[in-house]
Image: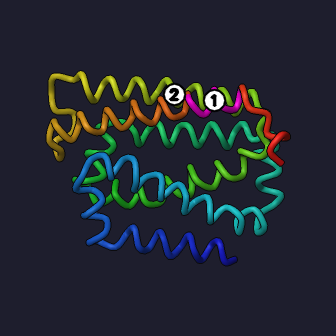
Amino acid sequence: MKQFLYGLLILVFLALPPVANLMESVMIIHMHMQMPLLIFTGFLFARLFQLSFPRFFEKWNRNGIPGIILFVMIVTYWTMPRSMDEALTTQGMEVFKFISIPILAGVPLRDSWKKLKPIVKNIVFYFFIFVFFGMGWLYIDSPVQLCNNYLIIEQITLGWGFITTAICMVIYLIYVAFVDPTKYE
């Protein structure tokens, strides 16, 4: 219950108009700080949902695959320039962002991750590495402004943020491949 309350406090804080406006005023903070924090709030919500509805999660997310697919779909949707732009211009999309990311991305991520086999976890990492390199290239190399609410320099900065995140994920996968964690326990 404590985790749910902490998640709710973080969500309410992130939804406060001054905080939301500040975080959404800079493109890279909007994408690489606000949205991961919303996923984290859903991650905190998940424990209460798992305890309250254990049969539901056991029935529809037995091996973790459906939940991780839902997580991937929601996160991929919110990396698109059009969805980011719509969240800034339409109040309904802003509300949808604050509901869909925690509930449809954070909760399934927590429920699914422990259930997934290592090969599936690696596939998820490979997918996001591919998507982040692609989105980084798109935001950097696009000759036009992709989001009407942000300047082109912010778009390029976000692109480099995507590239940096993808490189960090590659480094993590290399680390996991070559380091035996039992030696450090």
Residue 9 badge: none
The answer to if 149 sits in the magenta stretch is no
Residue at horizontal 28 percent and vertical 71 percent from the top: 17
Decide: is 74 above or below 131: below
Tell whether label 1 touches label 2 (CB within 8 Å). Answer: yes
Observer-nearest residue: 146 or 173?
173
* Earlier sequence position, callout 2 versus callout 1: 2
Q: Residues within 10 Å of mark 2 (few under 14, many from 20)?
A: many
Magenta stretch, main secondary structure, is: helix
- The crowding category of the residue bearing disc 1, from other C-alpha atoms within 10 Å (few below 14, some 14 to 19, many at least 20), is some
* Residue 129 disc label: 2
Residue found 41% across the figure and 34% down from its top: 164
Secondary element at image label 2: helix
Could you tell me which secondary element the residue under label 1 belongs to? helix
Q: Amino acid at mark 1?
A: Leu
**Residue 33 percent location from the top left of the image:** 40, 53
* C-alpha gap between disc 2 and disc 1: 10 Å
Residue 90, given in percent of the width and then of the height, sits at 26, 55
Residue holding disc 1? 173
Quadrant hosting residue 161: top left
Please tell me whether mark 2 or mark 1 is closer to you in this view.
1
Residue ranking furthest to the front: 183
Kind of residue sitting beneath label 2: Ile
| Residue stretch in magenta | 171-177
Q: Quadrant of the N terminus?
A: bottom right
Which image quadrant for residue 144?
A: top left
